[in-house]
Image: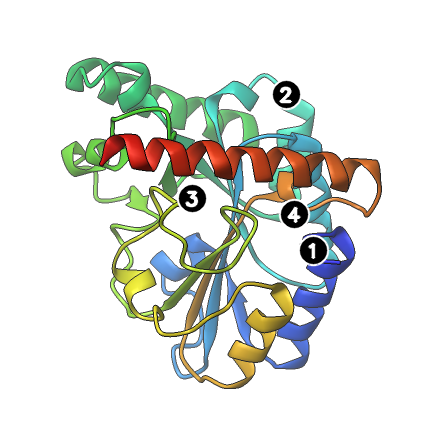
Amino acid sequence: MDFTVKKYKELLQFLVQQRIQVISLDEYFLSRYDKTQRYLILRHDIDRKLRNSVRFAQICSDFGISASFMVRKKYFKYFKSLEQLSVNCFMGYHYEDYTKAKKNRQIALKMFFTHIKQLAQITKQRILSVAAHGNPLSRINEKELFTLITAPKIKDSYLSIIDPVYYFTDTGRTWADDNKTNFYDCGIFVALRKEFNVKTTKELMDFILNTQENLYFTIHPERWNDFGSGWLLQYCKDSLFNIIKRIIRKIKK
């Protein structure tokens, strides 16, 4: 069964066994890794179910793995959970200020830097990495906000990556490059591996075995649950949401 906590652990165990250097976005941007060895940037977007992310951060720590966890503003009020997260991982800001400000640049930038300062105070970490939160119901491309930011110490999880990597995300409950259900993660990274048909986590691990390129994974912890009612409910939600996104895609055309 795919997209379970057990399968997530199997994936991390596999990466450890293959001696792949797993790093956070912060470590990549600060060049705190061995550039002579193969690496994988591991990022988690906390869109929903904060408790899943807290659990995943602990799992990463148990495997001795560094990872990034990107937090939306709506979760800033859960101080204890964020403090617990920050002990085991590198924290980043999952921004959606451009959308919230309705593309008002001045307001969006003020919100952006205020939220980064707040997150830094809560987690007691320097917030270096940021990632745009995509909303398929919105016509606003949140990444446009980062093009307005001149602060050199802030790095975007896409726009600031300068090296070629094979990029995979579990968006749409598949590792495949499916632009019908994945509106915002398509780009130069995806273009590097369009020829590969990778859908399941098992196929992803097989792919890793057959290539020596560097990698970048984005994972949404709310999608991964212990097999049972929670897993089944999330499966139904993802399936329904994929249908809605396909309809939106057709309408936008």
Q: Which residue is mark 4?
A: 88
Is 77 left, or right, of 250 in this rendering?
right
In-image side of 219 versus 230 (left or right) = left
Residue drawn at the location 30% of the way across and 21% of the way down: 99
Residue placed under numbered mark 2 in the picture: 78
Labels 4 & 1 near each other (Cβ < 8 A) = yes
Which element carries disc 3, helix, strand or loop? loop
Question: Furthest-right residue in view?
Answer: 228
Q: Secondary structure at mark 2?
A: loop
Q: Residue at x 26, y 53 (%)?
A: 160
CA gap, disc 3 and disc 4: 31 Å
Identify the residue position indicated by label 1 in the image: 61
Please name which of the two marks, 1 or 3, marks the residue nearer to the observer: 3
Q: Secondary structure at mark 4?
A: helix
Residue under numbered circle 3: 181
Residue 220, above or below 47: below
Mark 3 surroundings within 10 Å by alpha-carbon count, few (fewer than 14), some (14 through 19), many (20 or more): many
Image quarter hosting the N terminus: bottom right
Residue 213 in the image: state x and y as whole percent.
40, 79
